[in-house]
Amino acid sequence: MVSKTEEARVTMLENQVDNGGGGAWEYLCLVRKLKLRRSDKVLKHGLSILNDPSKRSSLGPEEWTLYEQVAIAAMDCQCIDVAKDCVKVLQKRFPDSKRVGKLEALILEAKGSWAEAEKAYSNLLEDNPLDQVIHKRRATMEKAQGNLSGAVEWLNKYLEIYMADQDAWRELAEIYVSLQMYKQAAFCYEELILSQPTNPLYHLAYADVLYTLGGLENLQSAKKYYASATDLTGGRNTRALFGICLCTHAIGQLMKGRNKDDKDSTELQSLAAKALEKDYKLIAPTKLSSLTETLRSLNLS
């Protein structure tokens, strides 16, 4: 995750370079280091260096890194010819490189030549069956073609080997949600919470899935995870606060006639409602009446 300081540094350098103040190479290095997606800027400023022989030669060995960075940015911007030119330079310098081979396969992907890209990746996997990048690309290709079940299959195979990859678990969870396979999505978010228990986004997403599944037990668990997301964000997560209110209402509907008084639950819903009203007064006072009406309909105001 990019810190505010790093984000401010990137913005400052970007404005500086865009206005002709220099620092293009520093900007490109920072974008690459932070793994930011600034493809149009990388393409523009990267080419300005590569097309200037004196600037290019001053990079030393980093010249090849820049060619790779610009090639990927060009593919992202659908400038396939520029990407091909960059890869040709790299092929000439590194004729047997598997890394360059991956770039060639990426170009096939960008062109929509799925069968050729699959063949290229299969050939690369013969030399290194455990290549993480290639396994991820195969899942990405399936998703790009609209074959979500195929993407799920490849991600599950990948996660059997690389179980600690949080990005893959998150991607798999999101695909499951889009397929309305909520139990499977819940399992993915459980894995994410185990690996990063202090990340409020995982608690929130897990609570959303449990709320969607419904049923008393799931709703009670969802309420707990909405509460933990609220706690982890210092009480400033509006979605989590609404989640507490909605879970409280749904649980109340299911518990009708059971005469079970839950003092802690009543106190929590009251705190959530008050926090929402306070936030709306500060941030969106014109919407306060709508909030009050909504809470009243949930018997929370």
Image: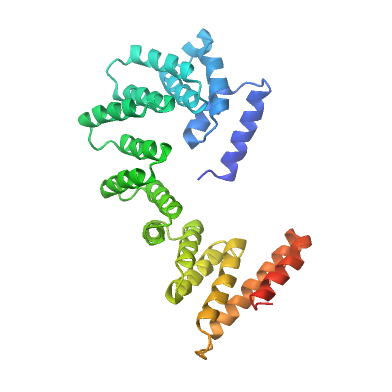
Q: In this figure, what is the number of numbered marks?
A: 0
Nearer to the camera, 68 or 139 = 139
x and y, in percent, of residue 19 in the image: 68, 23
Q: Residue furthest left?
A: 126
Could you tell me which quadrant the C terminus lies in? bottom right
Q: Residue furthest right?
A: 286
x and y, in percent, of residue 286 in the image: 78, 61
Indicate how the structure is coloured in the image.
Answer: rainbow
Q: Residue furthest bottom?
A: 259
Is residue 117 shown above or below 240? above
x and y, in percent, of residue 197 in the image: 43, 60
- Classify residue 61 as left or right of residue 19: left
Nearer to the camera, 167 or 27 = 167
x and y, in percent, of residue 216 in the image: 45, 76
Q: Is residue 237 visible?
A: no
Residue 13: image quadrant is top right
| Residue at image location 27% in from the left, 46% down from the top | 157
| Residue at image location 33% in from the left, 43% down from the top | 150
Is residue 222 shown above or below 178? below
Residue 113: image quadrant is top left
| Residue at image location 38% in from the left, 24% down from the top | 108
Q: Is residue 210 visible?
A: yes
Residue 221: image quadrant is bottom left
